[in-house]
Every structure is written in structure tokens, then in C-alpha cells.
Amino acid sequence: MNFRSLLRVFVAASSALAAGVVAPCAGAQNSQNDSAVTNRPWLTKGDAVAGALAVLATVAIAPLDGRTARELQEQQFQRSDDLQHTARDLAFLGGPGPFLMGASLFAAGRLSGMPRVADAGLHMTEAVLLAASFTGLGKGIFGRALPNVNVNNPDDFQFFRGFHDRNGPFVSFPSGHAAASFAMAAVVTGEVDRWHPGLAHIVGPIAYGGAGLVGLARMYQNVHWASDLPLAAAIGTWSGLTVIARTHRNDRQFDTRSGIPTELVEMLRSTSVVPAPGHREALSWTLPLELGSRSPGH
């Protein structure tokens, strides 16, 4: 297995995800009247199926973790300045990138009087935060060692080690960068489809292909195993689709007293402070999970 083969696999998988998941969901969203207010569920049957498939993909890929990680660290790949710079640029898109892009879109939209642009920036930030919450929880629970700890030991899990002090080397699973980039891809695809119906079939493969490359870049940087990516992609995609489905600007209800979107009020009310290891405190969110469809009649 060489670098080009891995690149083709990631692009193909990301494109398939865009065509098979994003486009149908976007079509379902367009079937609604934009002015209708709907309380959509947080978890649908389709989400449950996608999650199960992600778990199966994780299990299927896991035996290749060690071999893939060692191969990507060979000198023929690591000595390339172009690959090093590209990997750093792609990793940025899964780290501070989505937050900077979200804030920039929101500010530009508000200043220029373009509410759709501001809305897209807000949704991007919300989706990435939601994805980060779930991946952070997973990292803490599974406590998997990064490949740069020992590239020959991909099975180094220790439950709840990721919550301990000095947990930096033990937060590999699932990939936060991959989840954030897939959340951003889902939001971009969903928003573009609302603005120009049908463009999701073009934007989706590009956005999701880029998200897949972010995951590959993190593997190249030796901070994630291949099996860290499928569940992260599912979490990120779910986060983006859920935020778009529940909080589109034209579908929002506003708190009559404060003028704040009802969804944001609900999130603030469900936020609490809980004890964390090391005599620290952390924020906790409670999300109501409902089995159903994102749109009425589906």
C-alpha cells in the first residue's frame, strides 16, 4: 500500500459518503417549507445505521493500523517538504480553521447585511462544537495512545485514561480534527443546497473529499491511526446535518423575552458545570435523543 493508494481510498470513501448521505438528507430538507417551524429529533434511525456502519468500518480497518502508520513514516514520504507543508495546511482545516472560518463568515455576513452568510458561519461553529463535545468524550473514555507513542502498538487502549492529567499522548480515538472537518463539510454542503438546490451533488464530494484528506494528513503526521477516522467522520457528519436540520435561520423560533434563538436558549439551559479530574471543572451538555426522521413524513 503506497501513499497514492491511500489518497485514492480516502477521496473515494469521502465522495461516497457525500453522495450517499448528504444529498438525500439535503433533499429531505428542501421538501419542507422554509417558513415552517419543526422540532426535529436529535437522533434518527438513519443516524443509528450510519453509526453502526462506522463502528463496523473501524473494526475492519483496525488490523491495518500498524502497517499503515509505519509505511507513512518511511523516509520516502516524510522527507518531502511539499507533503509536510500540505499536511500542516490540511490539519489546520480540522483544528482552528473551522472556528476562524465560522467567525469570519458570521462577521462578514452581519457587516455586509447578508444573513445567509452569517447563518452559515454560526452553523459551522455550532456543528464543530457539537462534534468536539462527542469526540472529546470518546477520547477520554477510550484513552488510546497516539501512534507517535509506539507505532508498533495500535492496541494501546486504557479506559478513562484520556481524562487524566498529562493525557496528551492518549487521546487518539476518535480523531477530533477529522470530526471537525466532516462537520464543516456537512454544513457547507447543506447551506449551499439551500441557497442553490442541486449543487450539493457538486459541492458535497469536494467538501467531503477535503475532510477525508484532513484525516489522512493527521495519519501522515503520526498522530492518528487509520481506525480513528470512520467514527470521527460519522460524528462530524451527524453534527453538521443535525445543526442544519434544527437551526436554519428561517426555521428558528426566538425567545420572546430576549430575542435569542430558542435552540440556543435550550442549549444554555442544558449546560451545567461538573467536576473534572485534577480538581478542575468542565462544562456538560444534556441532549434529548429522539428516534425519528429529520423531516415530517420521513
Image (cartoon, helix red, strand yellow):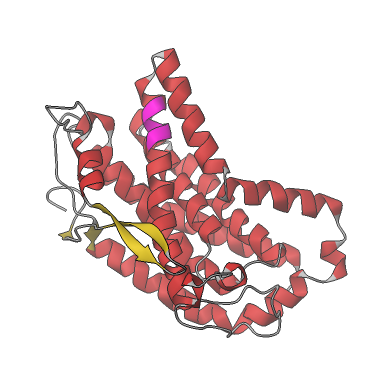
Residue at 58 percent of width and 84 percent of height: 156
Q: Position of residue 272 (x, y in %)?
A: 27, 54
> Residue 270 vs residue 70: left or right?
left
> Residue 256 vs residue 155: left or right?
left
Is 234 or 7 nearer to us in this picture? Answer: 234
Is 22 or 255 nearer to us in this picture? Answer: 255
Residue at 59 percent of width and 59 percent of height: 215
Magenta segment's dominant SS is helix
- Number of numbered markers: 0
> Residue 213 vs residue 33: left or right?
right
Q: Position of residue 125 (x, y in %)?
A: 42, 41
Does residue 21 appear anywhere in the picture?
Answer: no
- Say whether residue 253 is magenta: no
Single out the residue that lies furthest toward the top.
112
- Say whether residue 119 is magenta: yes
Is 253 or 297 nearer to us in this picture? Answer: 253
Does residue 124 appear anywhere in the picture?
Answer: yes
Which part of the image, by quadrant, shows the N terminus? Answer: bottom right
Q: Position of residue 33 (x, y in %)?
A: 17, 33
- Image quarter of residue 37: top left
Single out the residue that lies furthest toward the front.
279
- Image quarter of residue 166: bottom right
Residue at 16 percent of width and 29 percent of height: 35
Q: Position of residue 66 (x, y in %)?
A: 67, 81
Residue 182's place in the image compared with 73, above or below, is: above
Residue 256's place in the image compared with 124, above or below, is: above
The residue segment tinted magenta is 118-122
Residue 135's place in the image compared with 121, above or below, is: below
Residue 44's place in the image compared with 169, above or below, is: above
